[in-house]
Image (cartoon, helix red, strand yellow):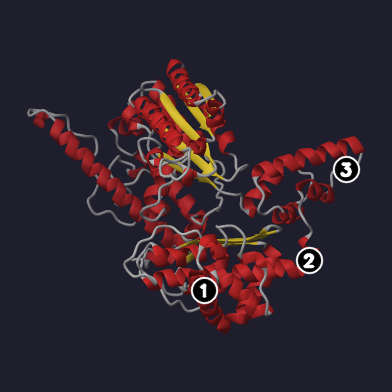
Amino acid sequence: MNRSNHSPARPDWWQFAEDCARRYHLHCEELQQARRKTLKEDAPDDSAGAEEPLVPPAPDHPLSLLQHLSEQPDARHLPPELWEALEQEGADPYACDNTGRWLPGTDLPADKLLLLLRIAAAFGSPAAVDAQLARGAVLILHNVPASGFSSVENLLNHALLPPGWQAYDARQLVADLRLWAEGEVAWSEIPHSLLLFGLPGTGKSHLARAMGRSAAVNCVETSCAEWQSAGHLGNLLLAMRRSFDDARKNAPCILFIDEIDAIGSRDSAGDNSASYRRQVVAGFLEQMDRVSLEEGIMVVGACNHPQHLDPAVLRAGRFDIKIEMPLPSKAMLQHLLAERLQNTFSEDVLQQLARDFIGKTAADVDAAVRSARSEARHSGCPLDLQLLRCHLGVRELEENHGLLYRICVHECGHAITAWIFGEAITQVRVAAAGGTIERDVPANAGLPADFDRQLYVHLAGRAAERLIFGTVSAGAGGSATSDLGKAARMVLAMDFELGLGAFGNGWFGPQDPAQLEEPDRKRLREKLDYAEDHARALLYPHQQLLKDMAEDLVQKREFDTKEVRSWLRDVPRKNGPEPVLDQ
């Protein structure tokens, strides 16, 4: 009888798990080859008479890894003494039969393979992995023992994540520092520095302090504001040097520097403080270079605006690892609320609260809950939703559906146009203060057509409003980082800096839009008008999709990568990947 008749039906994630196992097998094979090469180079010439191993080498051409796992229901199938002998020799007992010989096909450690299967089954498909790579996405793995973190990280890096991606846990720095202190690893083998950046209230300082406590080492805390409070330039540099000296005296330790973006950049010329900034940056670089030559000092910096830092400060060697702390997603907000409110409300209510809190930081949530509890305690009233919303300053957008719908139409206009040009939209989010869209722009050659496409995307929100409502709001304007601000600076850069506009090969440096002469203003207006008209023409065939998508966003307030793809999968793309197929 055919053996396949006895095989259970394979789950949907089986092929995905096979692909992951194959990738991990290739990684392990490369490691084994490297080890064999090292052993061969280090082996003495008279090693021919060495004792023969208990089991022969693993087969060169293994069969299906998952097939053998499904055929061995009792994993620990060997006598204890044989099991121990195999382990002492360095063999994998799980991969051997009852006599201690290799089973064909099981050449990965069973503990790694079982963990890999659990992870693959949890994701289920490559599309689910992609969704977790979206900016702001949160993935929580339960029941992973502390000793298993390195295994999970190893499997994610070599079996699941696409090339170029790497899983990293800030706790790894803590573990590395402990291992160095115990003499297990050399200082040259671990990262020496970490930069945490993001909006205020996203938990950068909290994480840095927690790292110091977890490492069970000394922690020296300082900030650029503390250095500057010391007085004039000489006193500032002296205070800076004293902080680094304190770290040396307390090594092994973590040196935590807050508000590090206040150091500035030497490129920010043009005002009376340029010379002052150059000396501050030079002094900081000197201290970072000196401390990098010494052992036992891990530097952790935190800032809101890394783009304001000098490029020399940001390079590897000064800050080896850089981690962005984004605003929490709806799922993360719900998790935070559940943790802070301790079963006070049902899961449905927490989902509603998380939706209302979109755009707020973890610090906002903490402060609102504390303040609401305090008022409820002193007034003798129970803690309710209205009180929480009041203390968080959440406006009841449902009472002004028209405003929220306009915001959603604006953001969905950006999303549809970006999708048409082959961009990956990782998140669309709306809140009382407005909306945001996060997207990955494909690499391009910087041709005029590439800049034109970005202009269309920047003005697509304004175009969507005009298309649906016949009018536009001020939502596209405001600061230099607004839609209109970015589009205007891009047009001016093409004309005055990039040699792609009105002045050909001329280079005239960055321009201040407020100081333009009338001919330049007119040319800028015409270019932006044309870009908005073009964006509106792109959106015209998708009006009903735009309306339906915006209505759904009104209810959900946030779309992740998967939801955006679900809405836009049938929209043809002018550039980039083909329409997304079902996974």
- Callout in the foreground (2, 1): 1
Name the residue at the right extreme. 380
Real-space Cα separation, disc 3 to disc 1, in angstroms: 60 Å
Where is residue 302? Give x, y as percent. Answer: 52, 37
Q: Which residue is mark 3?
A: 382
Q: Nearer the viewer, residue 256 or 286?
A: 286
Which disc, if any, is residue 400?
2
Secondary structure beneath disc 2?
A: helix
Question: Is the N terminus in the top left, top right, bottom left or bottom right quadrant?
Answer: bottom left
Where is residue 277? Give x, y as percent. Answer: 45, 36
Q: Which residue is mark 1?
A: 522
Residue 13 vs 371, above or below: the answer is below
Name the residue at the bottom extreme. 541
Q: Nearer the viewer, residue 523 or 426?
A: 523
Where is residue 331? Give x, y as percent. Answer: 63, 53
Residue 237 vs 87, above or below: the answer is above
